[in-house]
Amino acid sequence: MSAPDAIFAGSVPANYDRYMGPLFFEPFARYVARRLSDLSAGAVLETAAGTGIVTAALVDTLPPAVAITATDLNQPMLDHAMAKPALARVAFRQADAQALPYGDAAFDAVVCQFGAMFFPDRVAAYREARRVLRPGGRFLFSTWDRVDHAPVAHAALEALSRLFTPTGTWFLERTPHGHFDAGAIERDLRAAGWEAIAVETVTQTGRAASARSAAIALCQGTPMRAEIEAFGPDALAVATDAVAVAIAARFGEGSFEAPSRALVMEATR
């Protein structure tokens, strides 16, 4: 992962939350929260919490007796999450998932939705998740499958590639959709000390208000924005328009639903 792939700043956090959330992240967030719905007390740690989409699902699902801590390395994303009144019960902290500032055996569950792809040292992050879990605790995390299993993102990349010639690959295929080998993920987990590992392929359906809102999500709500802007002062507007047309050709211009596929891993301490 290149350093710019981890930069979520400026208007990106707001666009990410408003447009990316309902289409890509919220359905999986609810799914992950349901997987932890048997917790009646204790403590949950979320790493790579971003703008608090999974955090909100955890707040909605888990009783007040479960303490929720949400961390992220990117302060602008965390600032956006902290401003949400519905997340007032959550303890937020800027933290690196590869070097967590918590003691051993401090949590009953660790959750990380679509963050592992951004970790420079995944084995270190998986080892840290194991360290801070109590015996019997669960580490639940997800990564996106191949980009061709995300038809909205795939349509966007096709449109962008007709407009521009990127240096190498686009952010979406390189990082979010670039870590889909279940065997490699399991090997990393075992290298970090995990033994009880389950992998599941999960498809969820998200909703977009319009083809244009989906185009804004992908072109302006991710670090791909910087890649597009590098092609010139009008590139972002031109790209957003072209991606909106491509998505509308497949899903229509108005509100629509679309599937995305992910790998969900659960490892038990």
Image (cartoon, rainbow, N blue to C red):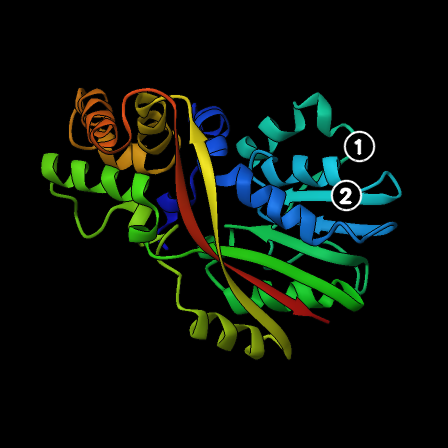
Q: Could you tell me if residue 86 is visible in this image?
A: yes
Would you say 134 lies left or right of 158 here?
right
Would you say 112 lies left or right of 169 here?
right
Please state the horizontal and vertical placement of residue 154, each as a whole percent of the image: 26, 44
Q: Are marks 2 and 1 in contact (CB under 8 Å)?
A: yes
Please state the horizontal and vertical placement of residue 162, each as a whole percent of the image: 10, 38
As drawn, 186 above or below 262: below
What residue is disc 1 on?
A: 89
- What residue do we see at 41% from left, 22% from top? 209
Q: Could you tell me if residue 91 is visible in this image?
A: no
- What residue do we see at 74% from left, 40% from top? 61
Please state the horizontal and vertical placement of residue 60, each as a whole percent of the image: 73, 35
The quadrant where residue 102 appears? bottom right
- Which amino acid type is marked by label 1? Arg
Between 34 and 99, the one nearer to me in the picture: 34
Mark 1 secondary-structure assignment: loop
Please state the horizontal and vertical placement of residue 198, each as a whole percent of the image: 59, 71
- Which amino acid type is marked by label 2? Ile
As drawn, 117 above or below 251: below
As drawn, 192 above or below 232: below
The quadrant where residue 56 appears? top right
What residue is disc 2 on?
A: 68
As measured in the structure, the alpha-carbon distance from the residue carrying label 2 to the one carrying label 1 is 8 Å
- What residue do we see at 51% from left, 51% from top? 115
